Amino acid sequence: MQRQKTIAKWLVIIVLVTVAVGAYIMYDALYLGGETADGGANTVPPTSDPDVTPDEDPPFFTTLPRHSQTYAGITVAHAGGEGEEEVLGTVLTQNTVYLFFSSSSDEYDCRGAGIYVAVFEQNSLIAVTRFAEKDCVFGGAKLTRDGVAAVVSEGGRGRLVVFDSAGKPKGETDIPAFSSAFPLVADGKLSLFLTSSDGLSFVSVEEGLSPVVSPFRFPTVCEVKEGFASGGSFTLAACDGTDTFILTFSQKAGFRCTETYDKSVFLQIIPIAGEDGAAFAMLAKQSSGVLLSVLSADGEELAAAVREGSSSAAVFGDGVSITLVRPGLTETYCRHLDLISSTPTDLRAGEIVAARSDSENNILALVSDGVTTVYAEDGYGNFIPLIDCAHAEGKTTAEIVGGTLVLVLSTSSADGVFFENFGASDAYLVSLPL
C-alpha cells in the first residue's frame, strides 16, 4: 500500500512539472515571441515599451531575408515600416545594393526613429540596420576598399561607419562635425569634403580608418554637389543656395575657386570629351531659365550660354555633343555651345529630380502634381514613361547596370507593383529592363 502511494505521489509531481514546462513554452511562443528559426526578428520589441498598454496590439516585426517580387519583368523590393521613410543615398556594388534611409517607424523592418541601411542581395532584403539617430545629418556613402562607408554628424561629432557585406557595422571612427558632406573615392582612398560654419574642409581617410584633416579651407559656407578626381587633384561643383562655385583642390595647394556663377543654383555636372582632353558640362538654374557651361578639366570656363524658359532641366553627353532636356523641348549643342538642333517634345512640365545615361539610354525622373514618373528616351528626342508612383520626400537615384534600370526612391504608393507598402512612405528598390 505504501509503495502505491509513493508511485502516485511521483506521478502527480511528474504531471505538474510537465504542465509547468508546457505553460512556459506557450508563454514564450505567444507573448515573448522568441527568435525565429532563421535568426529573424522578434514579433515584439526586445525591450518593454511603457506606451503599450495590455489592450493594444504589440508591434509586428518582419522576418528576414525577404524575397523581392517580380511583375512583368519588373523586380520590386522595399524596406520600412508603418511611418515615413525617406531615401538618403544608395551604394551599388557588383551583387549588393546598400539603401540608406531615415525612418519614423516602430514596426516591420524598423525599431524606432533613426537612420538605417537596408541591404539587398540577389533580389532579397537580407538586413536592415539602424546606426544613427533620426536627427543626425547623413553625409553620404561610398564603396571603399574597407567596405561601404557612410558618414553622419550630430551634436558636434562626426562619425565614419563602415559596413560589411551583410550590412553590419564592422568599423567606426570619429571625424570633424559637419552640416553637409561629400564623400569621394580616388585611387582607392576615401576623401571627404565637409561643410561647417567655418567653410569647406578636406579630410583624407588613411589605412586603418585614420582621418587626416587638411590645414586648407575654403572660407565660404557651401555644399559640394558633385566632384571628380584626376591626377591627385579634385574638381568640384559647390553651391551656397544662391551662387554656384567651381573649385579645384589639391593637398599641396588647397582650394582655388576658378568660376563663380551668381544667382545660379546647381543642378548637374557631367564629364564630356573635350578637344584637348576631358571636360565637363555644368547645368544650373536661374530666375529666367538655365545656365549651361562647359569647363576644362582644371575648372576653367570654356563656353557658357543662358537658355530662357523652364528652369527644370537635365543634361546628357555622348562624347561629341551635349543634349539639354527641358519639359517640352530638347536641344543639342556642340562642345562650344553652338546650337545644333531644337526639337519640341511632349515631356510634361515638372521638376526633374534624377538623370542618368549610358551609351544607349537616357533616363530621367520627373515630379509633377505629386507624381514621380520615370522616362526613357526613344532615340528620337521623345521621352516615354516607364513607371510612375506617388511622390514622397527623399533622394531619387537612377542607375543603368547591364541594360537594366535600377531605381531607388521613396513613395507612398500602394498600388500596382508597390502594393506591399507597409504604410505612409517606404524606401523602394525597383529594377526593370530597358
Image (cartoon, grey):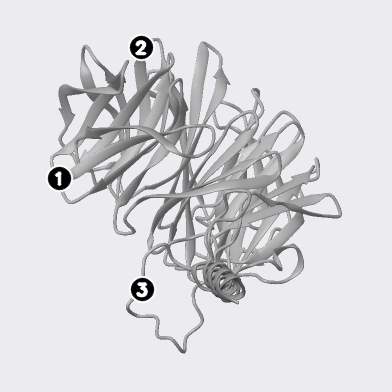
**Other-residue count near label 3 (Cα within 10 Å), few / some / many at <14 / 14–19 / ≥20:** few
Q: Is residue 280 visible?
A: yes
Q: Which mark is residue 183?
A: none
**Other-residue count near label 2 (Cα within 10 Å), few / some / many at <14 / 14–19 / ≥20:** few
Q: Residue farthest to the right?
A: 72
Secondary element at tag 1: loop
> Going from the N terminus, do you reach mark 3 or mark 1 first?
3
Tag in front: 3 or 2: 3
- Disc 3 from disc 2: Cα separation: 53 Å
Which residue type does callout 1 highlight? Ser
Query: Which image quarter is the N terminus in?
Result: bottom right
- At x 40%, y 57%, the residue is 287
Query: Which image quarter is the C terminus in?
Result: top right
Quarter-of-image position of residue 333: top right
Q: Is residue 344 visible?
A: no
- Disc 2 from disc 1: Cα separation: 27 Å
Q: Which mark is residue 197?
A: 1
> Going from the N terminus, do you reach mark 2 or mark 1 first?
1
Q: Which mark is residue 49?
A: 3
Disc 2 marks which residue?
232
Q: Nearer the viewer, residue 141 or 216?
A: 141
Coordinates of residue 308 in the picture (x, y in percent): 51, 53
Task: In the rendered view, tell whether residue 216 sits above or below residue 68.
Answer: above
